[in-house]
Image (cartoon, rainbow, N blue to C red):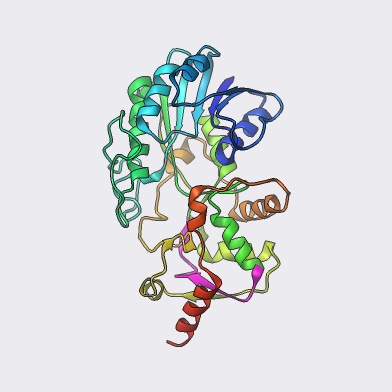
Amino acid sequence: MRVLVLGGSWFLGRAVVETALDRGLEVTTFRRGLSGGADPDGVRGIRGDRTNPANLERLASAGPWDAVVDTTGYVPRDALAVARALEPVVERYVFVSTVSVYRGWPVEPLTEASPVLECPPDAGPHYGYDGDPGPSVYGFTKAGCERAVSTVFGPERTTVLRPGVILGPREYVGRLPWWLRRLERGGQVLAPGDPDRAIQPVDVRDVAVFALHSATVRAGTFNVTGPGVDTFGSLLAECAAVTESDAELVWAADDFLVEQGIRQWTELPLWRTYAGAWDVDASGARAAGLVTRPLAETVADTWKWMHSGEEGIQHERAAELGITPQREAEVLAAWHAR
């Protein structure tokens, strides 16, 4: 099987490449080559920019491929151009989208039948608006990318994956690494809300396996999340275990944290009070072959990667993450003084 990976240098793209190589597939990557180092041995690397028509023409001339896995599509008009360039030389298009495309995210429980944000397939990078907690420009434009790909390839040749929160080695947003470092530091740790709150993170390597698998099964749209058997409490317990931390978790109620003005999702990463944040139905993906590993394995392997010496990439959103020690101490004092 011949696979083209758009991206391939970091996190999910790199996981797709490594998984494909492990399975003996013929792998080509198309990326700018500005980050992530060299391609792994055995990969045919084509350098170029997906916004450059000449680069896309050159890419298409290097085909054909049985499938393309697109991990870097964010602007609808660019996704449309990529799809048009590749349609003659690619059999199946696997587009990695997001649960943020749903109108109800993160407020309502979601299935693949839930309404999706409206965005034209030729929209630019700033289409839509940011709500709180409602829609985001990111969600609008990802929805437009989905539409762009399916418009060109048709439903029979398009697979759309809508992951929730992806964690694991090489995570560049840094949500799990932040908690690992915080637990390692020890002391009293401000823990958000109910420790029994179910969460649904999915390991990046499991998403990669399913992306390649879905290129060989029926086309369709799949939510891709963990099974919801883990909790926020078990997540932080695993972080404490792998860091050998003696930290004391202090669980503060949601309402109190909201009153304190703690920013959800960022100041205490992965914490959100809305009912739909961790209620995404991925039964369709599981029926189609998605298999997810235990969260404990994801935590342990992320910690191992953090100490591997491999240089990480910082996503622009990484700067938003985390509560400062001073702010955390103030909130803990207020919680104890109730």
As rendered, which of 222 and 21 lies closer to the eye? 21
Q: Is residue 149 visible?
A: no
Quarter of the image containing the N terminus? Answer: top right
Hey, which quadrant is residue 79 in on the image? top left
Q: Is residue 218 magenta?
A: no
Q: Is residue 154 left or right of residue 91?
A: left
Spot the residue most to the bottom: 337
Q: Is residue 40 visible?
A: yes
As rendered, which of 310 and 188 lies closer to the eye? 310
Tell me the magenta residue range: 185-199
Give the tally of numbered discs: 0
Q: Is residue 188 magenta?
A: yes
**Is 88 drawn above or below residue 250 in the view shown?**
above
Residue 57 image offset from top left, x and y in percent: 47, 15
Quarter of the image containing the C terminus? Answer: bottom left
Q: Is residue 325 left or right of residue 153?
A: right
**Is 189 drawn above or below residue 236 in the view shown?**
below
Query: Residue at the spot x=51%, y=15% of the render?
Result: 58
Residue 87 image offset from top left, x and y in percent: 42, 16
Q: Is residue 35 left or right of residue 328?
A: right
**Is 302 drawn above or below residue 248 in the view shown?**
above
Residue 106 image offset from top left, x and y in percent: 35, 54
Residue 17 image offset from top left, x and y in percent: 61, 31
As rendered, which of 37 and 234 lies closer to the eye? 37
Query: Residue at the spot x=32%, y=57% of the render?
Result: 133
Query: Residue at the spot x=48%, y=53% of the render?
Result: 200
Query: Residue at the spot x=58%, y=32% of the render?
Result: 8
